Image (cartoon, rainbow, N blue to C red):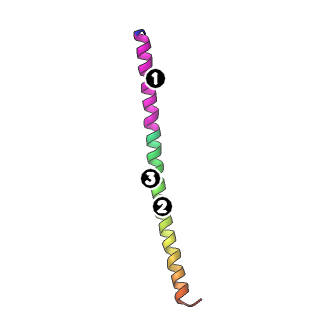
Amino acid sequence: MSLFDVVEQLCEVTRLQADIIRKQAEVIEQAKIANSVASELAAMRNTVVAELNLINKEGY
């Protein structure tokens, strides 16, 4: 294997590493969104529970 081939393979490995880093960054951002939505949904569920409790207290 020539020096050129070695350099070419190292460049390919570097490109693959960059792809991995990009995908990991994307997954991290998606996780942040999922966490944000989870909190929002929990708040919405709490509102529903509170409303149902009020309805039950009023005897409907």
- Residue 59 in the figure: left or right of residue 4: right
Q: Main secondary structure of the magenta part?
A: helix
Work out whether 21 lies above or below 45: above
Q: Which residue matches tag 3?
A: 32
* SS at badge 2: helix
Q: The residue under label 1 is which amino acid type?
A: Glu
Q: Is residue 19 magenta?
A: yes
Magenta range:
3-22
Residue most extreme to the top: 2
Q: Which residue matches tag 2?
A: 38
x, y percent for residue 15: 45, 27
Residue most extreme to the right: 60
Residue drawn at 47 percent across, 69 percent down:
43
Quadrant for the C terminus in the image = bottom right
Residue drawn at 48 percent across, 54 percent down:
33
Residue most extreme to the bottom: 59
Give neighbour class at mark 2: few <14, some 14-19, many 20+ (Cα, 10 Å). few
Q: The residue under label 2 is which amino acid type?
A: Ala
- Residue 28 in the figure: left or right of residue 48: left
Work out whether 1 lies above or below 12: above
Residue drawn at 47 percent across, 33 percent down:
19
Residue drawn at 47 percent across, 45 percent down:
27
Label whose residue precedes the other's in the sequence (2 or 3): 3
x, y percent for residue 44: 51, 69
Q: Which residue matches tag 1?
A: 12
Give the alpha-carbon distance from disc 2 to disc 3, as whole Å.
Answer: 10 Å
Q: Quadrant of residue 7?
A: top left
Label whose residue precedes the other's in the sequence (1 or 3): 1
* SS at badge 3: helix
Q: The residue under label 3 is which amino acid type?
A: Lys
Quadrant for the N terminus in the image = top left
